[in-house]
Amino acid sequence: MVIRNVRNFDHMDTIYYEAHKNLYLNLTNRCSADCVFCIRNFADGVYGYNLRLSKEPTTEEVIEALKGLDLSKYREIVFTGLGEPTLRFDTVLAITRWLKSQNIRVRLDTNGQAALINPRRDVISELKSAGIDSISVSLNAESEEKYNKLCRPVHKNAYGAVLDFIRGAKQAGINTRVTVVEVSEIDIEECRKLAKELDVDFHVRALSKAASKDLKTARDPDI
Ligand code: SF4
């Protein structure tokens, strides 16, 4: 059961929410990609939570909000959001350091483009030093051509950078997995093979109901 647990500022933003026995952090609605299946194109959030932010929360606001919770009851705290967390890289690092000082498991859900988003940073080393326990990377394509078509990244050579990020995270000893969304354009088995070559875990994510309905209608306007 998903329990509504929303931290409201005066503007009523949801900066964290519970699901799957985890606590998810919503730091930004911005992203360096524009995936055709992105929930941002179809809904305001997930699990009944409106994740549209009127302003991005500061590091201090997030930590202050987390201090009021019993964090030990969650399996892990997950940077996710309705956007790409590594656009707030310093905030991710600072909150991770604070959570690790409380002995809490921390996961980053990311599009894997952190090195392109933060070109002057050694993103893997910094995540490792901050203490991140695991990273889940949205791979979503078995080839660069398909990735560009489906994920429409802002940066050039994004697919190669995503693969490098996955390799780097694995080499750094961070628990790493890749995910794909279950849409017909993606060759799930080829992606599974690629994950095996990269020696990382593999997870298929169901497409959100809202995206599923709208994408189906877009492909077949007679529906
Ligand atoms: S990477 Fe994630 S947040 Fe960014 S556009 Fe794709 S699905 Fe949306």
Image: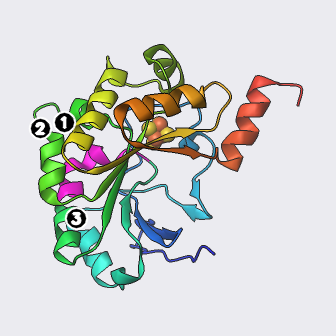
Residue closest to the eye, 49 or 165:
165
Is 105 one of the magenta-colored residues?
Answer: no
Predominant SS along the magenta part = helix
Q: Which mark is residue 118?
A: 1
Which of the numbered marks, if any, corresponds to residue 95? Answer: 3
Query: In the rendered image, which quarter is residue 13 located in?
Result: bottom left
Mark toward the start of the polypeptide (3 vs 2): 3
State the image coordinates of residue 119 (x, y, percent, origin top left): 16, 31
Asked whether mark 1 and ligand 1 are closer than 8 Å, the reply comes as no
Contact? badges 2 and 1 (CB < 8 Å): yes
Q: Which residues are magenta?
A: 83-93
**171 or 78, which is in the foreground?**
171
On the image, the x and y values in percent for residue 76 come to 38, 68
Q: Which quarter of the rendering shows the C terminus? A: top right
Compared to 196, does 75 lie above or below? below
Q: Amino acid at mark 1?
A: Asn
Residue with the most extreme top position: 145
> In the rendered image, which residue does mark 2 sit on?
121
